[in-house]
Image (spheres, grey):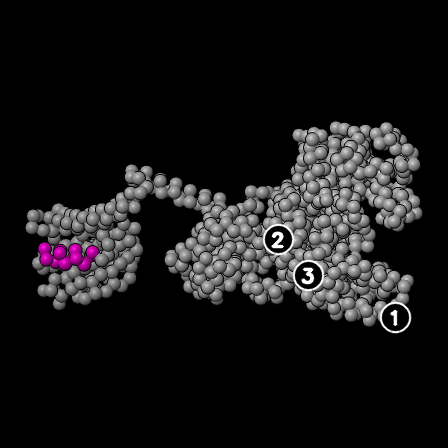
């Protein structure tokens, strides 16, 4: 048997031998196209190569491309399970020529592969061509030898391929196989064409035009080729089975589903198994790429796929989470070709399980309501829109799930009524919204939100993507364009720019398109879901509807990621070191540093801080993956995730986990788990290093740490080291000896100061004196010794006065000391024999007044005072002296 894996490699090898570059599948979420929901064909990654915008070093390529057709143009969701060939997820094998070969060689390459390599019976093959494409018809005659009746001309869009509303397009030619009369169906173009007898398995598109948004078709610079072969369809042909679901890969998935529900498929139930197997692939590949179930955009399409599969699982009799159990089988089947499944296995299974748990809680109640409401309805009747909306709003039934559930009974759903109920609810929500008070500004954002919906954020996975401008706002009002030099806000259908929230600053970067370029100065979230990019137009004119290439400032974002992840690590490390009373009180995550405020009453000691750093850096060194899951808030909190008290969370939250605790109570368990919508590193090693640079108090009971990571921490240490080197070089020693040298210098200085003070004292008391001591004068028979001494501390005044008293034996000593910082102190001593006549306290007061001071105190034999006015030192001495004369 030719397995799916064999077919894939035969195809790719064949085209590689014919000069084609073998390339990897591009992601399912297209980064280069704002108009596409999911990659729906192999050519999507080459769109800009076809139009000439982008150059590649090769002109031929071949791929096996992951595709999802469930939402937007090419939506096969409703068909899956009910035909033998439709899938929401499939692999498209393709060969591409970028202005290299065209129709003739494309047909020749295809014909040889199909008939020689794959060995299909040429008599069972037939083709279609676009009705006016005589050229293609002639080549088929020449190359395949087909007669006219095997070349069917189709006048409809079926044979004119377009990727979406815009993009490269052209007439196409499809190859069909007739699988025999025993299967119902007719050839293409016939009334029975929808049957499964004639199976289209390869589409050759002759890319010649570019569909413009205005509806025109511009010729491409060079005609090109884009082909797409459904791998699963080819497998069904080569394996001789009637449907894609009977091929090896699907058989294994369906077997796994059968063992999970403990029942084998019957003709009544087989469609449910098929739905589950197909939808399992879509959901797993989307989740592996970071799309998570949500209530809008791509996340909502994913949710619809998941819930549809879940309902089918319950039809098979299970009422517990089942589909997540099939993930390992899928990974075994497809993990080799798509390693993202292997890497994401645990996360995929967990996301599916959580969505199953969430949905199962309301599913049976919803189904009961559906049954009650439709009890009286018959084939051809319609279920009211209000009921369908209630099922959607309260029980999480996407509209198509309700439609799917009723299709078998021939009951339709009133879609108009459903839409009206939805619009009513939105209007209500808008009325209840309480904004920040800037009424006029919020009004404009609300009308933008109403019209264009919430912006889809692609920035968890990438920092660059395309986006289409859906609204422009300038000075509080919507405008049609922003001119060069103008500042305003740009809203796009999707964006990689993070909008400021949860303490993380918004992204900056650039936007550019064919007619304009702009710098993004900041990004904020408005009206709850609109990402407002504040820009300045640097060139051209930015218009509504324009497709733009959006590029986040990568270096800045990288630094922000590291700081945000480090904040989580610090949070946990602080709890570990200080206790579980530590709770986040605020945070600020920027590119240059992070700030984290938390409840704690005392300053952290150096040891505590060192321990916090040690623990956080231990997780950095582990270099483990940072994992994000989507959970219901209650489940997340129950699992131990840290949530902010008082913070409003949606019904579902992102939960970010990192690290494995190495020590303590949590040893072996996840180190940090927090509810968080921010962007994070992929592995903790990218944080580089966590360094706390400050610890302060912000309010009573709230402390703040500020920290640096990665390059910021490196720059900080470099700066510290530069300073140390500068110090060492000034000291003329090596950095290692700097401390000892400084300590020696401090000691030396202390000794010198002492010596200087002594010398000054000596000089003061001895200056101008005879050898026996200080020179005193005699006033009214009393010896008076008065001195002004510079560089003298107040505490040294007394000692000096005592010394003077000894020197003169009997008399009065007055010393005014001037400190280095310009203050003055005065002390007066009276020898014992004179205390009856003079009080040192009175004398010092007189001196202190002269110095601009007041008071002073002491005893009759010794008193001291201060004064601000050092310039009046001599006057102070004179004032005391004057007291003797009076
Ligand atoms: N783009 C074409 C298709 O999807 C051929 O690859 O059918």
**N-term-proximal mark, 3 vs 2:** 3
Q: Which mark is residue 376?
A: 1
Q: Nearer the viewer, mark 3 or mark 1?
A: 3
**N-term-proximal mark, 3 vs 1:** 3
Residue at (79% x, 35% y) in the render: 115
Query: Label 3 belongs to which residue?
Result: 260
Instruction: Where is residue 822? Give x, y as percent.
Output: 29, 51
Dot 1 surroundings within 10 Å: few (below 14), some, or many (20 or more)?
Answer: few
**Quadrant of the frame with the C terminus:** bottom left
Q: Nearer the viewer, mark 3 or mark 2?
A: 3
Q: Does 25 appear above or below 643?
A: above
Residue at (77% x, 34% y) in the render: 116
Region rendered in magenta:
796-807
CA gap, disc 1 and disc 2: 45 Å
Instruction: Where is residue 341? Give x, y as percent.
Output: 63, 49
Dot 3 surroundings within 10 Å: few (below 14), some, or many (20 or more)?
Answer: some
CA gap, disc 3 and disc 2: 18 Å
Lateral position of residue 635 relative to residue 309, left or right: left
Residue 448 visible within the image: no
Instruction: Where is residue 284? Give x, y as percent.
Output: 67, 52
Secondary structure at numbered mark 1:
loop
């Amino acid at each position: 048997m030719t397995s799916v894996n064999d077919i894939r490699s035969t195809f790719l090898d064949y085209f590689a031998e014919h000069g084609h570059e073998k390339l990897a599948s591009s992601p399912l979420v297209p980064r280069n196209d704002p108009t596409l929901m999911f990659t729906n064909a192999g050519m999507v990654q080459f769109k800009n190569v076809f139009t000439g915008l982008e150059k590649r070093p090769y002109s031929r390529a071949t791929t096996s491309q992951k595709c999802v057709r469930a939402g937007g143009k090419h939506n096969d969701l409703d068909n899956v399970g009910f035909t033998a060939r439709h899938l929401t997820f499939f692999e498209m094998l393709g060969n591409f020529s970028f202005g290299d070969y065209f129709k003739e060689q494309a047909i020749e390459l295809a014909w040889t592969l199909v008939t020689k390599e794959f060995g299909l019976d040429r008599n069972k093959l037939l083709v279609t061509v676009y009705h006016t494409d005589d050229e293609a018809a002639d080549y088929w005659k020449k190359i395949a030898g087909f007669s006219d009746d095997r070349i069917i001309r189709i006048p409809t869009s079926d044979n004119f391929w377009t990727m979406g509303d815009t993009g490269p397009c052209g007439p196409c030619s499809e190859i069909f196989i007739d699988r025999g009369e025993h299967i119902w169906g007719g050839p293409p173009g016939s009334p029975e064409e929808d049957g499964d007898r004639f199976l289209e398995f390869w589409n050759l598109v002759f890319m010649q035009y570019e569909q413009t948004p205005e509806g025109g078709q511009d010729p491409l610079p060079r005609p090109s080729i884009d082909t797409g072969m459904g791998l699963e369809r080819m497998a069904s042909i080569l394996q001789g089975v009637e449907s894609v679901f009977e091929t090896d890969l699907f058989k294994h998935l369906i077997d796994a589903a059968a063992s999970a529900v403990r029942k084998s498929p019957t003709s009544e139930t087989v469609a449910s198994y098929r739905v589950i197997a197909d939808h399992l692939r879509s959901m797993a590949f989307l989740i592996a790429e970071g799309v998570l179930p949500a209530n809008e955009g791509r996340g909502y399409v994913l949710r619809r796929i998941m819930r549809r599969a879940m309902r089918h699982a319950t039809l098979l009799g299970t009422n517990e989470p089942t589909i997540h159990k099939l993930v390992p089988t899928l990974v075994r089947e497809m993990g080799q070709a798509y390693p993202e499944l292997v890497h994401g296995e645990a996360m995929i299974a967990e996301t599916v399980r959580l969505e199953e748990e969430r949905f199962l809680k309301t599913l049976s109640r919803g189904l009961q309501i559906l049954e009650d409401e439709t009890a009286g309805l018959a084939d051809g009747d319609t279920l009211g829109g209000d009921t369908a909306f209630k099922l959607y709003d309260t029980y999480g039934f996407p509209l198509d799930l309700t439609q799917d559930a009723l299709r078998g009974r021939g009951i339709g759903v009133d879609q108009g009524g459903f839409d009206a109920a939805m619009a009513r609810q939105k209007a209500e929500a808008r009325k209840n919204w309480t904004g920040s008070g800037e009424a006029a500004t919020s009004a404009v954002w609300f009308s933008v939100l109403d019209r264009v919906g919430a912006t889809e954020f692609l920035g968890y996975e990438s920092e660059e993507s395309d986006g289409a401008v859906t609204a422009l706002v300038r000075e509080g009002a919507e405008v049609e364009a922003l001119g060069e030099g103008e500042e305003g806000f740009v809203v796009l259908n999707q964006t990689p720019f993070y909008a400021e929230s949860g303490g993380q600053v918004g992204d900056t970067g650039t936007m550019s398109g064919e007619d304009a370029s702009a710098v993004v100065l900041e990004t904020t979230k408005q009206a709850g879901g609109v990402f407002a990019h504040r820009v300045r137009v640097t060139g051209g004119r930015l218009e509504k509807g324009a497709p733009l290439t959006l590029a986040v400032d990568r270096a800045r974002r990288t630094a922000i990621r590291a700081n945000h992840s480090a904040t989580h690590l610090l949070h946990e490390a602080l709890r570990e070191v200080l206790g579980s009373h530590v709770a986040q009180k605020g945070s600020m995550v920027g590119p240059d540093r992070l700030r984290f405020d938390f409840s704690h009453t005392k300053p952290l000691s150096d040891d505590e801080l060192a321990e916090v750093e040690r623990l956080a850096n231990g997780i950095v060194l582990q270099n483990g993956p940072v994992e994000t899951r989507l959970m219901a808030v209650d489940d997340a909190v129950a699992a131990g995730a840290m949530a902010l008290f008082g913070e409003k969370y949606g019904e579902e939250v992102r939960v970010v986990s990192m690290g494995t605790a190495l020590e303590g109570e949590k040893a072996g368990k996840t180190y940090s788990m927090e509810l968080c919508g921010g962007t994070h590193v992929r592995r903790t090693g990218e944080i580089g290093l966590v360094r706390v640079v400050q610890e302060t108090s912000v309010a009573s009971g709230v402390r703040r740490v500020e920290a640096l990571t990665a390059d910021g921490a490196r720059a900080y240490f470099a700066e510290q080291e530069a300073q140390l080197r500068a110090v060492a070089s000034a000291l003329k020693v090596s950095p290692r000896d700097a401390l000892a040298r400084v300590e020696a210098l401090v000691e030396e200085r202390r000794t010198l100061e002492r010596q200087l003070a002594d010398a000054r004292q000596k000089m003061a008391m001895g200056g101008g004196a005879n050898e026996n001591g200080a020179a005193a004068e005699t006033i009214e028979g009393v010896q008076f010794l008065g001195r002004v001494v510079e560089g003298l501390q107040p505490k040294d005044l007394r000692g000096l006065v005592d010394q003077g008293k000894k020197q003169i034996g009997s008399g009065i000593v007055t010393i005014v000391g001037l400190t280095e910082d310009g203050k003055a102190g005065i002390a007066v001593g009276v020898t014992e024999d004179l205390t009856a006549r003079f009080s040192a306290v009175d004398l010092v007061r007189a001196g202190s007044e002269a110095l601009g001071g007041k008071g002073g105190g002491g005893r009759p034999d010794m008193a001291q005072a201060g004064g601000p006015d050092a310039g009046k030192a001599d006057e102070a001495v004179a004032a005391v002296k004057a007291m003797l004369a009076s």
